[in-house]
Image: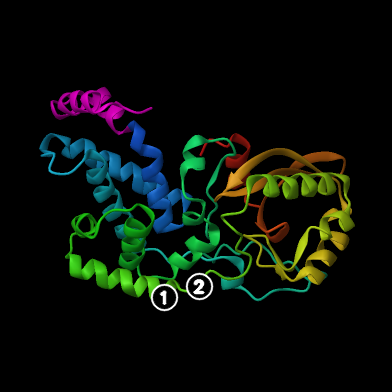
Amino acid sequence: MTWTAEEAAVLLERARSGDEPAFTDLVAPHRRELQRHCYRILGSLSDAEDATQETLLAAWRGIGGFAGRSSVRTWLYTIATRASLRLAQRRPARVLSWDAHPARDPLGDLGVPDDGVAWLDPWISAVDDPAETAARREAISLAYLAALQQLPPNQRAALILRDVLDFSAAETAEILGTSVAAVNSALQRARASRAGAEGGGSADPARPAAEEQRAVDAFVAAFEAGDVAGIVALLAEDVRLTMPPLPAWFDGIADVSVFFAERSMVTPWRVRSLVAVNGMPALVADQQVDGVWRPGAVMALGIRGSRIAWIASFLDPELLARAVSARY
């Protein structure tokens, strides 16, 4: 839903006068992008939801005093950024599997869910969601967000506002409540820290859609057929397979191949649906256990060229439920 400038002006005046439905309509076009913004800063779905709710509540309480010196969008981003930074100051940095634990033997102990690790949550959406298609894939990739999480929160926010959302230095300074010089300094440090930080398993955001679809179709066919050789033929030599919240992950085609042959594919799997996870194609898969199909995993495929460089498998039941609905 989008509004013309005239329609938005009418809604703003009604909202300023205390019309709550008008306020709801006014902010509705921004809600999803605000959630994504909070998620980029926090790396957590639940924290992003909390920050978004705090943003909308604060905006409703303050709409009467909104003077219109900036756009409604910029005003909302100011509130959302500051709400996210307050949360980020109290939260540990979110991490990927290789940041938290060493790679394991694919025939060894997989461990138990490690609830002591602040895992980076996946952003799950429908594959044909126009808002997600319009978003910059590289700016929400798991590898990019994991690199962001290693930055101090203020640098993280400055980088997102300037390099992802294209706010000017002056707008960013206003949003963060600081000076343009401070923003430029934070941005310079953030870019230097990030350089080369997006390592293992990251995919190619510029890959042609047809090439990606061929790799996905081939993986789905092999996966449902239990064809281990077919799966292995699609993998890059440096492929990684991760399974948060389990601590185990596997590094390289040899270990990933053994895991599929000896552990994963010893029971049947079926693909329930396809979704997108942080811009990557992903399968929502069920596993047959004792003759009963049960929710198994959300498996995102990081594809580099024509090869799969990362299988990011998420086992958390709550994330599986989100993927099934694909409404987050």
Q: Which residues are magenta?
A: 1-27
Mark 2 surroundings within 10 Å by alpha-carbon count, few (fewer than 14), some (14 through 19), many (20 or more): some
Foreground pick, 309 / 324: 309
Res. 314 in view? no
Residue visible at 46% across and 46% down?
Answer: 135
Q: In which quadrant is the N terminus drawn?
A: top left
The residue at 47%/42% (across/down) is: 134
* Label annotation for residue 244: none
In the displayed structure, would residue 212 be above or below residue 192?
A: above
Main SS of the magenta segment? helix
Between 241 and 58, which is closer to the camera in this rendering? 241
Q: CA distance from mark 2 to mark 1?
A: 7 Å
Q: For the residue marked with disc 1, what is the amino acid?
A: Ser
Q: For the residue marked with disc 2, what is the amino acid? A: Ala
**Residue 69 sits in which quadrant?**
top left
Query: What is the secondary structure assignment of the residue under circle 2?
Result: loop
The residue that label 1 is drawn on is 193
Identified at 25% across, 48% down, the residue is: 79
Q: Is residue 312 left or right of residue 93?
A: right
Q: Position of residue 175 (x, y in %)?
A: 22, 54
Residue found 77% across the figure and 61% down from its top: 235
Q: Which residue is mark 2?
A: 197
Asked if residue 175 lies in the magenta stretch, the reply is no
Determine if residue 175 is in view. yes
Label 1 environment density (alpha carbons within 10 Å; few <14, some 14–19, many ≥20): some
**Tags 2 and 1 touching, CB below 8 Å:** yes
Q: Is residue 21 magenta?
A: yes
Question: What secondary structure is found at the residue carrying circle 1?
Answer: helix
Residue 171 position, x and y percent, is: 21, 54
Residue 60 x, y percent position in the rendering = 22, 35
Query: Would residue 192 be found to the left or right of residue 23 on screen?
Result: right
